[in-house]
Amino acid sequence: MAEPPRRVDLRLTIPAKAPFRELAVELADKFAEYAGMSPQRAPDLHSAVEAALAGTSSDTIDIAMSSRGDELVLTTSASSRPTTFSLSD
């Protein structure tokens, strides 16, 4: 997929119950693909999003993702610290 022309941000607040959790994971996967994440790195992000969503007891889930250069930064309401992923191998 083509590299986006500028920094890309995604912010999402969704209900914490099914099927919205699965939708959030799918959306995170697509965002990573659009941001240029290699297919080899994608499972790491997928697992991190699933774990973050499973770790919340709130009625809603907040997810923020940003691509900056060769990094993708994930922040969720379930964690106070952002997680950074390399977009390349």
Image (spheres, grey):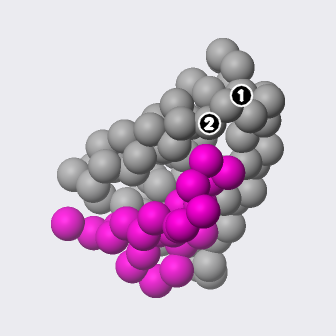
Q: Position of residue 49 (x, y in %)?
A: 48, 43
The answer, for residue 19, to whether it is visible in the render is yes
Q: Position of residue 80 (x, y in %)?
A: 60, 62
| Residue 71 placement, left or right of 53 | left
Q: Which residues are magenta?
A: 65-89
The kind of residue tagged 1 is: Ala
Q: Which residue corresponds to the image point at 42% horizontal and 58% vertical from the top-left?
A: 1
Query: Are dots 1 and 2 in contact, CB under 8 Å?
Result: yes
Of the two numbered discs 1 and 2 in the rendering, the one whose residue sits closer to the viewer: 2
Q: CA distance from mark 1 to mark 2?
A: 8 Å
Q: Residues within 10 Å of mark 2 (few under 14, many from 20)?
A: some
Task: Compare residues 50 and 69 and report the one nearer the observer.
Answer: 50
| Residue 71 placement, left or right of 52 | left
- According to the picture, the residue beneath numbered tag 2 turns out to be 56
User: SS of the residue at dot 1?
Assistant: loop
The kind of residue tagged 2 is: Thr
Q: Is residue 80 magenta?
A: yes
Q: Which residue corresponds to the image point at 51% horizontal and 43% vertical from the top-left?
A: 52
Taking the view exactly as shown, the residue that stands out farthest to the front is 57
Q: Position of residue 88 (x, y in %)?
A: 27, 69
Quadrant of the frame with the C terminus: bottom left
The label shown at residue 16 is 1
Instruction: Please determine whether, in this image, residue 71 is positioned above or below residue 31.
Output: below
Q: Position of residue 58 (x, y in %)?
A: 74, 34
Quarter assignment of residue 75: bottom right
